[in-house]
Image: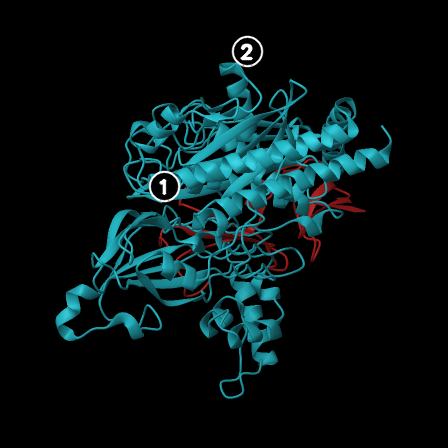
Chain colours: A red, B cyan
Amino acid sequence: MSRPVSANLEIRTGKDGERIACSACGHGLAPAGTPWKRHAALREISMNGAGGKAYTGAPEALLRQFSCPGCGTLLDSEMALPGEPFLDDIVHA
Amino acid sequence: MDPITFSIIRHRLFRVVDEAVITLKHVSGSAITNEGHDLMVSLYRADGSLLMGGVGFLHHLTSAAEACKAIIRRFKGNIHEGDVYLLNDPYTAALHTSDIYLVAPIHFEGKLVAWSACFVHVYDIGAMNPGGFSPDSPDIFTEGISSPGLKLVDRGEMRQDVLDTLLNMVRSPEMVTLDIRSMIACNNVARDRMVSLIKKYGHPTVDEACATLIEQSEKLLRARLSELPDGQWQSRQYMDVKGETAKVCLTMTKKGDSLVFDFTGSSPQSKYALNCTKWASLGGLFAPLFPLLCYDITWNEGVIRPITMIAPEGSIVNCTRPAPVSVATVGAIQSVNNAACATIGKMLAASEKYRNEATAVWHANHFAVFMFGTSQRGGLSIGILTETFAGAGGARTFADGVDVGGEIPNPISRMANVETMEATFPLRYLFRRRLIDSGGPGKYRGGLGMEIALTPHDAPDGGLHYVVSGKGAKYSMSEGLAGGFPGAPNRYVWVHNNETAGRNIDPSFALTLDEMPARKEDISWGVFPLMGKDTLYVGWNGGGGFGDPLERDAEQVRVDVEGRFVTPEAARNVYGVVTDAKSGAVDLAATKALRERLRGARLERRAAE
């Protein structure tokens, strides 16, 4: 039994209770109803050039890519300046 | 009330608005209105609450309701049949001074029964820069005429002294007159059709239908919200002006059948004109909410009731007088709109039932370049490059965003053709086309924005000038969804061809920005010349992408490269697709290996703030 948290994350019930898990591989990330991004693999690249030739913006702007530590599936991305907190999206348990 | 009569009256209300919009467009002489559709017409209840939201810029539906209420308060006891009121003060209800509301009471047998309201971005408002957008205005006092409410038409008679006073403070008074008369005509049509409707069915029946319609909308939206998961979703937008960065922060919380939009954490109000007032922020968040959550629900007061907004006073989303706001519609309001679109999209994506209604952010960055100068016919020519309305669609959970697909907050936005623009201004287009790589990469790609290059042509003064309020040249604003990249940012380039005049440089034959050999200066804020051989290049944002670019169908990436939607470099580096150098076909084995390598590179370290 699972409930979606986003297009590629879901809440799964297991022996540890309800946890947010990668929809692709089932890797558990965090307890349901809590921020999950700090448990993901993070890669930060400059927005400048990130998507191709038209990405001419400020080099200091970062594209944060949060991926599943289990399978490498890209779970979410956000643009941020250095030092900004993560955008936390929470679906209540 | 029997459902058949209710449905007929509901349908007639839609048609009242539609016919009024057509009238507005036919009478107006401004390209921004009848080509770009920078307009809005809606109907309101006798107390000023929204009854039937129309098409056009949806930011205005709630603000015009507040305008009606402000007029009711100010003119209580002195509102008569045939009156028309003007209001454009952003600190009372409007978005910025250029967007004038004309609101008119609708009476039946001597009783006030409803209001109609409309707006256009008038040709000029007497601000420090022609056309109204004044990036360097220091306060509201330099942003032109600003009225918290005046009576323009009294019992069917134009108050000529009032009109003449207004026209005495604007450039091109004949064009502004046409704008105002187009709105009067629009309201007249709305009033006549409403009166016909009431005559046919009787006021008690129509009034009951209107009340029922509002109750129905509230009930339907609350039911929809109840089906969506409880939670909170966040978004953050950056805007850059002259080296300063401002941000709009949003936490949207959904609990049960209500939504709270909290902008706590947003920057303090700016000294630059990209601020917006609280009414503007409210309109900004409703602009995506209406089409994304209420695509099958009538847009009225019932939709507003389940929604709460928190906008800290003195912040960029709730500035205090006399902060400048002339750029608000493409500044803080648009960022509010983008942030609301992003959070609503994420909430919808968290629901299996509604996931296919989710979208990444569309056209997050209007560029709103206003040209002004002497036209090829010797008169004054002021107006916007209507390409600003030609945004790019955000990707959906099942499909790419629409290239040059428009924008969420204005379902009928569009751009004029090149010939119309060249007939309006003394300039010539070197090119206008989709901008390669501008769509946010993802499993489904964001739609592409465009690029244009302009140079003077047949200009009596040798050219003209333009106003740029491009706060999004440093940071992408079209957020992606579920891993999809944001769309590309905007870019504005002044190509100094005049400096190379002695070298026989003629930009007329340049097919790309790279082919222009002269000095290129990136610009974004202020007034600039387009004189002699100067060229203005504008490239604008694509929509946000959805999902992992490494999961995009490799064959589709090949098609993107072939069609010049995506460069071969981006195909390889971002999408991980390798093509055969000779045949152009996808090398499946090499693609698989590259994608595995790129995916592995993501796992280098765990996130920790």
Closer to viewer: mark 2 or mark 1: 1
Q: Position of residue B564 (x, y in %)?
A: 49, 73
The residues bearing labels 2 and 1 have C-alpha atoms spaced at a distance of 33 Å
Question: Along the line of sight, which residue is nearer the eye, A61 or B596?
Answer: A61
Q: Which mark is residue B174?
A: 1
- Residue B317 vs B512, above or below: the answer is above
Q: Residue at x 68, y 49 (%)?
A: B357
Q: Position of residue B484 (x, y in %)?
A: 56, 56
| Chain letter for mark 1 | B
User: Is there any visible trace of residue A56 in the rendered image?
Assistant: no
Identified by mark 2, the residue type is Gly
Q: Left or right: where does residue B158 sit relative to residue B498?
A: right
Mark 2 or 1, nearer chain start: 2
Q: Is residue B435 above or below residue B135?
A: below
Residue placed farthest to the front in the image?
A: B157
Which SS class for mark 2? loop
- Tell whether B236 sits left or right of A57: right
